[in-house]
């Protein structure tokens, strides 16, 4: 786990006072947490193996859900094997860098033999070029902007390493202007969309996964060139339901205590719904955002749904 053989939770607790709401520093115009930006050269130089699989999302778009599905598929639905370690240890977060002794994503990847599953929130243009040069498989998950924004807002409230989100109305402005960690949602979803065929990216939608999880698990399985039984697929669908994942300590990020995640402010897994944005946006805010969305997305036709 680390030089001192600490658990992930122990490493976070030991880092203690050195953890704070880090400022954002732009890398090629994309705001990233300072700890990531300060390690950028090493992240950009990362060389994956051709057998590695990358799971890419904008933050709070179904990342952990997809990670759990992939891990279960790789282990034929064996729930106990998939409880061998918490999610951030099982599937390293490529660009994440934190104060020592918390291991960085790159630290964890050095301890793993390919094939590896790797997580990233980096927009397409910041993904290390080795992934494309080695033709790695990439699963991208996109979530409709309004629900994604609501989920990210509550996450930024409880994630004490991210900039203070401030009031909701101001957060909408920051989201529209791409002033949050990992940058513009618009650029993120469009970047992977326009490259999906050329790069053989499996582009999934959160709403489709909620509407018909079995179908989407089968799509992921086929993309990974795997074959599991119908019984195992049904088991994976059940194990990765929101209710079960929220109660699974190896998936619900309860392994990440304060001073990183304050679960008393908002749980990491909050609702997992489609349409929760209707409980947050006023009619005026919704109209303002819809106008911005129409302008920003006029050059693409990505079939997002805000309700199912």
Image (spheres, grey):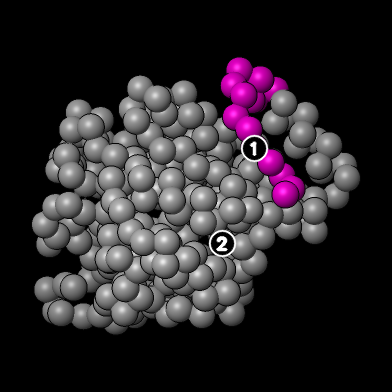
- Which residue is rendered at x = 40% and y = 25% of the image? 197
The secondary element bearing badge 2 is classed as: helix
Of residue 7 and residue 73, the one placed in the foreground of this image is: 73
Which image quadrant for residue 210? Answer: bottom right
Mark 2 = which residue? 155
Q: Position of residue 112 (x, y in %)?
A: 14, 60
Task: Indicate left or right for 229 with 304 as reference.
Answer: left
Of residue 244 and residue 152, the one placed in the foreground of this image is: 244
Magenta residue span: 295-308
- Which residue is rendered at x = 36% and y = 61% of the image? 229
Q: Position of residue 98 (x, y in %)?
A: 31, 61
Q: Is residue 229 above or below residue 25?
A: below
- Which residue is rendered at x = 59% and y = 53% of the image? 212
**In the rendered picture of this protein, how many numbered marks are placed on residues?**
2
Mark 1 = which residue? 304
Q: What secondary structure is the stretch in magenta mostly built from?
A: loop
Mark 2 or 1: in front is 1
Q: Is residue 50 above or below residue 21?
A: above
Which image quadrant for residue 25? Answer: top left
Give the mark nearest the N terminus, 2 or 1: 2
CA gap, disc 2 and disc 1:
22 Å
Q: Position of residue 307 (x, y in %)?
A: 74, 48
Task: Indicate left or right for 93 with 159 as reference.
Answer: left
Neighbour class for label 2 at 10 Å: few (<14), some, many (≥20)?
many
Asked whether residue 23 is drawn in magenta, I would say no
Task: Kindly give the residue lying farthest to the front in the view shown.
Answer: 230
Task: Indicate left or right for 37 with 114 as reference.
Answer: right
């Amino acid at each position: 786990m680390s030089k001192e053989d600490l658990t992930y939770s122990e490493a976070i607790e030991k880092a203690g006072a050195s953890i704070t709401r880090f400022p954002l520093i732009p890398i090629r115009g994309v705001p990233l947490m300072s700890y990531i930006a300060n390690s950028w050269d090493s992240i950009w130089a990362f060389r994956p193996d051709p057998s590695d699989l990358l799971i890419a999302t904008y933050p709070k778009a179904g990342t952990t859900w997809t990670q759990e599905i992939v891990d279960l598929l790789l282990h034929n639905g064996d729930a106990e094997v998939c409880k061998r370690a918490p999610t951030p240890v099982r599937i390293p977060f490529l660009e994440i860098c934190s104060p020592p002794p918390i291991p960085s994503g790159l630290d964890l990847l050095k301890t793993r033999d390919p094939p590896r599953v790797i997580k990233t929130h980096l927009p397409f243009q910041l993904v290390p070029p080795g992934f494309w040069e080695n033709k790695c498989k990439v699963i991208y998950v996109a979530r409709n902007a309004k629900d994604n924004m609501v989920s990210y807002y509550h996450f930024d409230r409880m994630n004490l390493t991210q900039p203070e989100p401030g009031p909701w109305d101001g957060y909408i402005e920051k989201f529209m202007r791409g002033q949050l960690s990992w940058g513009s949602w618009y650029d993120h979803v469009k970047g992977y969309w326009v490259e999906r065929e050329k790069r053989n990216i499996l582009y999934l939608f959160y709403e489709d996964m909620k509407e018909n999880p079995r179908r989407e698990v089968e799509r992921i399985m086929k993309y990974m060139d795997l074959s599991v039984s119908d019984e195992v697929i049904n088991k994976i669908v059940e194990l990765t339901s929101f209710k079960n994942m929220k109660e699974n300590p190896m998936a619900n990020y309860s392994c990440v205590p304060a001073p990183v995640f304050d679960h008393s402010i908002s749980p990491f897994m909050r609702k997992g719904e489609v349409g929760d944005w209707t409980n947050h946006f006023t009619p005026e805010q919704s109209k303002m955002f819809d106008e911005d969305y129409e302008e920003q997305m006029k050059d693409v036709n990505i079939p997002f749904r805000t309700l199912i």
